[in-house]
Image (spheres, coloured by chain):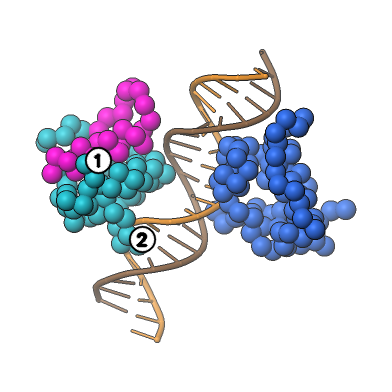
Chain colours: A blue, B cyan, C orange, D brown
Amino acid sequence: MVVPDFDPGDTPGYVYEMMAEHLAARIEAGELEPNTPLPSERRLAQEYGVSLGTARHATRLLRYRGLVVTIRSKGTYIADRRARPQ
Amino acid sequence: MVVPDFDPGDTPGYVYEMMAEHLAARIEAGELEPNTPLPSERRLAQEYGVSLGTARHATRLLRYRGLVVTIRSKGTYIADRRARPQ
DNA sequence: TTTCATTTGTTCGTATGTATT
DNA sequence: CAATACATACGAACAAATGAA
């Protein structure tokens, strides 16, 4: 299962929401495994071609959804599948 | 003192760029000699009254310009004048 | 060998300013 | 005016490597 590349292009909606959706899809698809760290927010920002603020906004949404757990000065980790809502 | 004190004050431009310029001037003026270590980044941050991140940004610019060489867990050294570009 | 201090490397948290829509 | 997005800047904490004791 492969998640298509991220391409905000001219698709409607907010960049930070699309980015969060894209990351969520990668997590749910198992491409990003539980208890492993996400790339840093600055790295994510680079990879997705967005600003740090936007990347932070996206990871915050994932946090709200319980898909990731962020530990300050350490990183953001994929949550256990059983600890995830739904 | 050959190079005037650092004073970002209300001058235009970015702090990290002005700091890099100031350090570059000190290096080119010979105040800081080749093969000697710069003060640590945290020390530089204190001396210049800026944050660690800004000091690191400044030394990174010097690195790009080939004025210094940074060795992890050791320090940042003034490059040989003959090894410097231009 | 182990311990410790120093220094760079990395990361998140937060605030502010600017431009655009 | 408000929301989005970007960039700078500061702070705090942790990680890793080096070298000395």
In this rendering, do the residues under marks 1 and 2 share a single chain? yes
- Return the x and y of residue A75 as percentages of the image width and height: 60, 55
Which quadrant holds the C terminus of chain B? Answer: top left
Mark 2 residue type: Arg
- Return the x and y of residue B69 as percentages of the image width and height: 29, 54
Q: Earlier in the sequence, mark 1 or mark 2?
A: 1
Q: Residue at x 30, y 36 (%)?
A: B19
Residue A1 placement: quadrant: bottom right
Q: Secondary structure at mark 1?
A: helix
Tell me which segment is drawn in magenta: B6-30
Report the side of C10 relative to B2 (left or right): right
Q: Residue at x 60, y 54 (%)?
A: A39
Looking at the picture, tell me which residue is in the foreground, A85 or A40.
Answer: A40
Q: Which mark is residue B74?
A: none
Which quadrant holds the N terminus of chain B? Answer: top left
Q: Chain of mark 1?
A: B
Structural crowding at the residue carrying mark 1, measured as other residues with C-alpha within 10 Å and reported as few (<14), some (14–19) or many (≥20): many
When the figure is inspected, residue A73 is found, relative to residue B8, above or below; the finding is below
Mark 1 residue type: Leu
Q: Which mark is residue B23?
A: 1
Q: Chain of mark 2?
A: B
Report the side of A5 relative to C5 (left or right): right
When the figure is inspected, residue C15 is found, relative to residue B40, above or below; the finding is above
How far is the residue under mark 1 from the one under mark 2?
A: 20 Å
Asked if residue B32 is among those painted magenta in the image, a careful observer would answer: no
Asked if residue B23 is among those painted magenta in the image, a careful observer would answer: yes
Structural crowding at the residue carrying mark 2, measured as other residues with C-alpha within 10 Å and reported as few (<14), some (14–19) or many (≥20): few
Q: Which residue is mark 2?
A: B72
Q: Residue at x 30, y 44 (%)?
A: B65
